[in-house]
Amino acid sequence: MKRCEVLGIGVDLVENERMHYMLKKWGDAFKKRIFLREEREYCDSKAMPHRHYAGRFAVKESVSKAFGTGVGPHISWLDMEVVRDDRTGAPSVRIKGKAGRLARKRGVKRILISLSHTKNYAVAQALILAR
């Protein structure tokens, strides 16, 4: 089995009620700034959309932290798309744009994601592996 080098690890915890507040206060402007259309459609189809938005927000934060940059000049919110495997339900992240270029530059082979929800919180962890 080939070994992979760990390039970074990131974690984020989001209060569901804070996300609920942000969605009520800023509405579509907030959603469009942070989430891609497919992410919005998925979250909005759920009984409690704010919990799913919180989870996706946590994933994006954890990925940006694993890169060591945070969200900003090197990685934007819309450079990351949280997707769900239709067969297993497992989350993963697709990266593009500035984040994709940074990943190629650093030799990223894979980004592993773990995501969990409770009534009050969403937590995500990202692990970036190099070739």
Image (cartoon, helix red, strand yellow):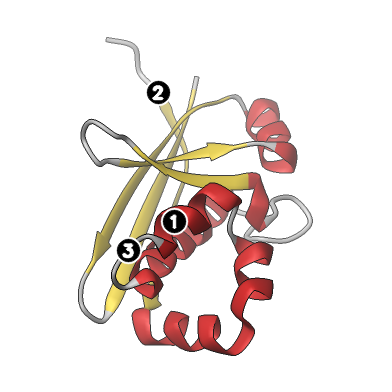
Q: Determine the secondary structure under disc 3.
A: loop
In the figure, residue 127 lies in which quadrant? top left
User: In the image, which is nearer the foreground, mark 1 or mark 3?
Assistant: 3
Residue 97, image x, y percentages? 73, 38
The three-letter code of the residue at mark 2 reads Cys
Q: In this view, does 34 lie to the left or right of 62?
A: right
- Residue closest to the eye, 102 or 18: 18
In this figure, which residue is indicated by the disc labeled 1? 59
Q: Which of marks 2 and 3 is nearer the N terminus?
A: 2
* Looking at the image, residue 81 lies above or below residue 33: above
The three-letter code of the residue at mark 1 reads Val
User: In the image, which is nearer the foreground, mark 2 or mark 3?
Assistant: 3
Residue 24, image x, y percentages? 53, 87
Q: Residue at x 43, y 83 (%)?
A: 20
The residue sitting at the right extreme is 73
Contact (Cβ within 8 Å) of mark 1 with mark 2: no
User: In the image, which is nearer the foreground, mark 1 or mark 2?
Assistant: 1
* Looking at the image, residue 96 lies above or below residue 65: above
Q: Residue at x 73, y 61 (%)?
A: 72
Near mark 2 (Cα within 10 A), the count class, few <14, some 14-19 or many ≥20, is few
Q: Determine the secondary structure under disc 1.
A: helix
Q: Is residue 121 left or right of residue 99?
A: left
- Give the CA distance from mark 1 to mark 2: 22 Å
In this figure, which residue is indicated by the disc labeled 3? 46
Near mark 1 (Cα within 10 A), the count class, few <14, some 14-19 or many ≥20, is many
Q: Which residue is drawn at 66% across and 36% down?
A: 96
Residue 109, image x, y percentages? 49, 24
In this figure, which residue is indicated by the disc labeled 2? 4
